Amino acid sequence: MQRICLFPGTFDPLTLGHKDIIDRALPLFDKLYIGIGINANKQPMFSEQQRLDWINAIYLNNPKVEGIIYEGLTVDCCKSVGANFILRGIRYVNDFEYEKAIADMNRSIAYQIETVFLTCLPQFTSVASTLVRDVIKYGGDVTQFLPEIVNDSIKK
């Protein structure tokens, strides 16, 4: 059985913290989908297509990675791509409590899909898309928080 994983999130924008989790997860899975979830309760700064373009550009030469856009339940997206794992990144202890509640709910809905948690490296603990968007909004320099492709795109 292939190990197929979905890493869901808004990725608004994709940060070096996200990239760290993705890169460290790659050896664990045969295929890794990066799922850009559409959330009606959030107003993104960047379009779904822009975020998908960033993912595809960053991982252009890696056939194991594929960006997708989805709406609805994450477990339904997993089923649609054949994923048997969900990947989540953890920065702080309270992230784990929140993510465990979601993992438990997902397991109740689709027991065959397992959630895997990776902790971020210490240098990325404070890198959150929400904070990065605030810095962008007020004209600050976000170079140290974003992959080069994302940073170059935002500067244009």
Image (cartoon, grey):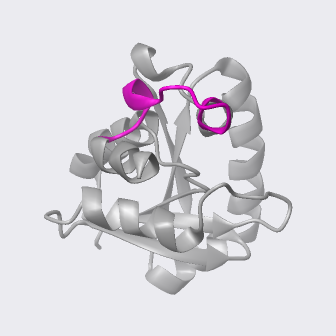
In the displayed structure, does residue 50 sit left or right of residue 135?
left
Picture layout, residue 95 above or below residue 112: above
Q: Please provide percent x and percent y for residue 34.
A: 44, 62
In the displayed structure, does residue 144 sit left or right of residue 90?
left
Residue at image location 51% in from the left, 74% down from the top: 49
In this view, the residue in front, 113 or 78, is 78
Q: Please provide percent x and percent y for residue 121.
A: 40, 21
In the displayed structure, does residue 61 sit left or right of residue 35?
left
Q: Please provide percent x and percent y for residue 46.
A: 59, 59
Corner quadrant of residue 69: bottom right
Picture layout, residue 69 above or below residue 153: below
Was residue 139 drawn as part of the magenta stretch in this picture? Answer: yes
Corner quadrant of residue 95: top right
Residue 48 seen in the current view: yes
Which segment did they paint magenta? 135-147
Residue at image location 17% in from the left, 63% down from the top: 62
Picture layout, residue 72 above or below residue 45: below
Residue 111 seen in the current view: no
Corner quadrant of residue 105: bottom right
Picture layout, residue 143 above or below residue 29: above
In this view, the residue in front, 21 or 45, is 45
Residue at image location 53% in from the left, 26% down from the top: 127
Was residue 87 drawn as part of the magenta stretch in this picture? Answer: no
In this view, the residue in front, 151 or 12, is 151
Residue closest to the far right: 41
